[in-house]
Image: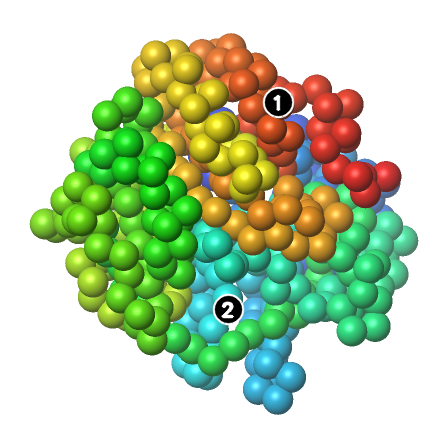
Amino acid sequence: AESKPMTESLRNWAGNLAYRAAQVHRPATLDELRQVVAASPRLRALGSRHSFNDVADTGGTLVSMERLNRVLAIDPERRTVTVEGGARYGELGRELQRAGFALHNLASLPHISVAGACATATHGSGEGNKCLAGAVVGLELVMAEGDLVALTRERDGDELAGAVVSLGALGVVARMTLAIEPTFEVRQLVYERLPAAQLESHFDAIMGAAYSVSFFSDWNEREVSEVWLKQRADAPAALDLAALGATPSPTHRHPIIGLSPENCTPQMGESGPWHERLPHFQLEFTPSAGAELQTEYLVPRQHALAALRAVGELRDQIAPLLLVTELRSIAADDLWLSPFYQQPCLGMHFTWQPEWPGVRALLPQIEERLAPFGARPHWGKLFTMAPERVRALYPRLL
């Protein structure tokens, strides 16, 4: 395996975290990966380094999965695809599309690794769509001694449900098998300046108006800056938000007002394959703003509006630090450490300016407002919630 000392700091995608490890290994084969794991007393695996906190950090050894990134097999009969631990959604999407298949859901960024996204319950959106990890039907884990352990949904049911969202703590994911379905096309419509009163009055109808729905807000009391509707081309027409006072966007938009939409997926109702519409950003471009911080809280869906009102009381403190807030819904699953375990959720996602002292001071206030609703933090983003509080939110956290 390629192994290098950390002569200069290895950083995460956003640059806000420098990993502490003294050495990083980049195995190119399964045997090399097993040898690295067996020889390392303390080890963490890296995917695409898109976590904003130190969930994948260690003072021991890092193993990067970037060279173990192949799509290994597409099984049309069983409707599954098997990938190596370092595979990214962007490349996987293209291979599935060529074979006539699709995943049920994708995150905003096709740049992230499949195994890393599933390990942290990263999610995508849609009232009827489970998080990305909900597609996992099989895992092969390299355990501490280098042994390979295989779990399948069919054979190991509840054990697999406990292993998928593992934060990398059970072992290194060498291979992962996902359920797939026939390919489909999506068209993306963007509306601007939806009156806030209409959001309150028609929240459920708008959230359910398309296959995937995102609200983008700066916490303005009067209006929501953008609503993105990602609609399957084979579904009935999406709700016309113009009837609720929103304005159809006259051109392509970026979620962050003022940034070029060049790096975003096509909008304006232009139909295209699922993997080129469900993400917000294109694989070839820098996603989002680049230099940023991210926080997200997953609120039980029935408390969505009450939680939004509670956090809205902090709009004057939020606005100076904020780039944009995105609101999405995600279906319930049975994965033990998923924020969506046995409950559909509203994802309340904050993209912050890279001003950590100010954000760090504000997060406890947001968390206090969300505490009555049992909001769970996203495992890979920034939060200040006490460990005992987080533990209490997960009935199967051992």
Q: Is residue 332 visible?
A: yes
Q: Which residue is mark 2?
A: 103
Q: Amino acid at mark 2?
A: Leu
Residue 294 drawn above or below residue 287 = above
Residue at screen point 31% across, 54% down: 229
What residue occupies the far front of the structure in this picture? Answer: 201
Q: Residue at the spot x=38%, y=42% of the render? A: 203
Q: Residue 372: which quarter of the image?
A: top right
Q: Position of residue 330 (x, y in %)?
A: 52, 50
- Residue 361, x across and y down, in percent: 51, 10
Question: Looking at the image, is 93 positioned above or below residue 393?
Answer: below
The amino acid type of the residue labelled 1 equals Ala
Q: Is residue 66 visible?
A: no
User: What is the crowding at mark 2: few (fewer than 14 residues within 10 Å), some, or many (at least 20)?
Assistant: many
Marks 2 and 1, how far apart at CA: 34 Å
Residue position marked by numbered label 1 in the rendering? 371
